[in-house]
Image (cartoon, helix red, strand yellow):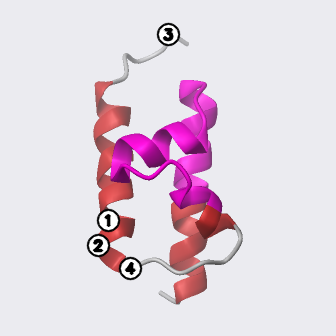
Amino acid sequence: MTSDEIRTNLLTRARTYAENAKTSLSAISLAAVNDSKFLKRVEVGEGFNINTYQRVIDWIDAAEAARPCEAA
């Protein structure tokens, strides 16, 4: 995976969760890494390390698992 693919994956997962949970990227950033501007900085191309990436992905995974399933 390239760094661009990692960035895209992170933003895609965060945006999808934000839309489904009706929350903001800022709220996800704050909850996952205690930095409300983290995902906004990622969007504009600022760097991040793999540990921070994994913290956000782990947080999204846990948050998705905790959300009640919606009826079809």
Sequence-wise, the earlier of marks 4 and 3 is 4
Q: Is residue 43 magenta?
A: no
- Please tell me whether mark 1 sits on a helix, a strand or a loop: helix
- Asked if marks 1 and 3 touch (Cβ < 8 Å), the reply is no
Amino acid type indicated by mark 1: Gln
Q: Is residue 17 magenta?
A: yes
Q: Which residues are magenta?
A: 12-40
Amino acid type indicated by mark 2: Asn
> Does 67 sit above or below residue 25?
above
Mark 1 nearby-residue class (10 Å; few <14, some 14–19, many ≥20): few
User: Mark 4 and mark 3: span between their CA atoms?
Assistant: 37 Å
Instruction: Please tell me the numbered disc located at residue 51.
Output: 2
Amino acid type indicated by mark 3: Ala
User: Mark 2 and mark 4: span between their CA atoms?
Assistant: 5 Å
User: Mark 1 and mark 2: span between their CA atoms?
Assistant: 5 Å
Residue beneath disc 4: 49
- Asked if marks 1 and 2 touch (Cβ < 8 Å), the reply is yes
Instruction: Please tell me the numbered disc located at residue 71.
Output: 3
Sequence-wise, the earlier of marks 1 and 3 is 1
Q: Residue at x 35, y 53 (%)?
A: 33
Give how far across and how far down residue 61 sits, in percent. 33, 45
User: Mark 1 and mark 4: span between their CA atoms?
Assistant: 9 Å
Query: Which secondary structure type mostly characterizes the magenta part of the structure?
Result: helix
Residue beneath disc 1: 54
- Asked if marks 3 and 2 touch (Cβ < 8 Å), the reply is no
